[in-house]
Amino acid sequence: MINSGKTKATRAANYLLNRSNLLLIVLGCASFAVYWWSLRAHSPADIVWFLQLALIAGVLYAVACWLVLGTQASRSRSLIILIFGLLFRLSLLFAPPYLSDDIYRYVWDGRVQAARINPYRYAPADPALAHLRDDKIYPRINRNYAPTIYPPVAEVIWFVTTRLSESVTWMKITMLLFEGITIWAVWRLLGLCGLPRQRILLYVWHPLAVWEFAGSGHVDAIAIAFISLALLARRRNAQATAGFSLAAAALVKLFPAVLLPAHYKPRDVKMPLAFALVIVLAYLPYLGVGARGVIGFLPGYARERGMLSGEQFFILAAIRRLPPGFHVPNAAFLVFAILVLALVSVWVLVRQREEPDRYVSNGLIIACTFTVLLSPHFPWYFAWLLPFLCFVPSVPVIYLTLSSFLLYLTWLYWTDDQVFKIKAAMFLPFLLLLGLALWKRRTKLRINEPAAARLSS
């Protein structure tokens, strides 16, 4: 009778497993169709149609997350996830990018360096670079009046990639190779943390990663790979490697530097020293233009994006639109933002002394705080939150990253008031969901505390 009961239980488990896998395959096929259809979009005129597809892809992703998080681990399910993740990316790999033209600047910077010219010295439109212009890459460069904005590690990767091929497709392949590093690092870290590896779906199937990396080839894929390597090194207590990886991430996209407190261990000097050393060494080859020159177009970019006027920042823009008409100076908000980020960082440092294994969730807290304070104008700036979701599957963060596609509406509606409304549709529900999640957690802790007290007595 016991063996009969075990057999029935095994059959039931296999039935549920097969049914879950079948549903996952259906969701994967539907998502693949969405990515394939999205290739019909070619210009800003198609953006509303694209956003409808993004909504469908987001719903399919949410259902897939629910399925994976609510079922037991399965190797077959993990294999299905990885296969479809590859198919999603291959569907967009060979198509020209239509959501962004940043990738053309990557190719151009690699070409400039191959000509033994410092990419921080000249803008593409400068007569000194006239001999490097062509009819495929140069006409599509945005801001050809400005020197490059990208940090040194990104520039080195542009150079290496373009020595193989000065094509957009090959640059996309580079991004996918770094995505492979991300997937490997997250996969290993999930195992070390004792978490089901099928959680890799939360990164691999996320529409933001698919469209922004396989579709547009954004450099954030490289930064995320180094962030993931830093998380893995931190788990292995390889502090110098963690510092190196985190510095490399910051030298691709700058803002991963704010994750430094989440990786720091009390009384550890290897990680911060490795971080600082890599930063210094990476900039040395480009210092021929001076310390100010290697900053590139960053100040001009900050001015164009509304960081100097304050319209970039959603919280500041919201305060200025309150009925009394508060006019908070931009400098005051910047001081406030730095103070908030500093307080969160100190809280994280204190928390890690008590719970050293919480560094991944601490990293997500810092990353979300920074992202909300910055409130970027572009969807791909939210992609660095994705690897954290595999370990902390937060509903508010899933919403925020999926809703970031709304920022493509700024192609059509670009005034300050219109951009503010678009960001309000992203950040207000996120903050509401975050408040609800924190309230539920606090309520759960209050319920569990008396029960734990009774058991201990």
Image (cartoon, rainbow, N blue to C red):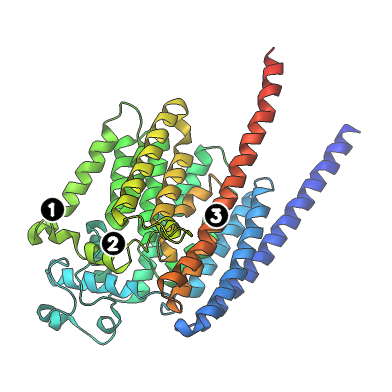
Looking at numbered disc 2 in the image, what kind of residue is underneath it?
A: Leu
- Name the secondary structure under disc 1: helix
Q: Position of residue 17 (x, y in %)?
A: 73, 52
Secondary structure under badge 3?
A: helix
Amino acid at the residue labelled 3: Phe
Residue visible at 41% across and 43% down in the picture: 231
Which one is nearer the viewer's eye here, 315 or 256? 315
Mark 2 or mark 3: which comes first in sequence? Answer: 2
407 or 152, nearer to the observer: 407
Label ID, residue 308: 2
Q: Residues within 10 Å of mark 1 (few under 14, many from 20)?
A: few
> In which quadrant is the N terminus drawn?
top right
Density class for disc 2 (Cα within 10 Å; few <14, some 14-19, many ≥20) is: some
Q: Nearer the viewer, mark 2 or mark 3?
A: 2
Give the residue type at disc 1.
Answer: Leu
Q: Position of residue 316 (x, y in %)?
A: 40, 56
At x 33%, y 65%, the residue is 306
Residue at the spot of label 3: 430
In this view, 190 is above or below 42: above
Residue on which disc 1 sits? 284
- Is mark 1 in CB contact (under 8 Å) with mark 2? no
Residue 292 x/y as whole percent: 13, 58
Q: Residue at x 25, y 62 (%)?
A: 150
Q: Earlier in the sequence, mark 1 or mark 2?
A: 1
- Say whether disc 3 or disc 1 marks the residue closer to the N-terminus: 1
Query: Is residue 213 in view from this perspective?
Result: yes
The residues tagged by marks 2 and 3 sit, at their Cα atoms, a distance apart of: 25 Å
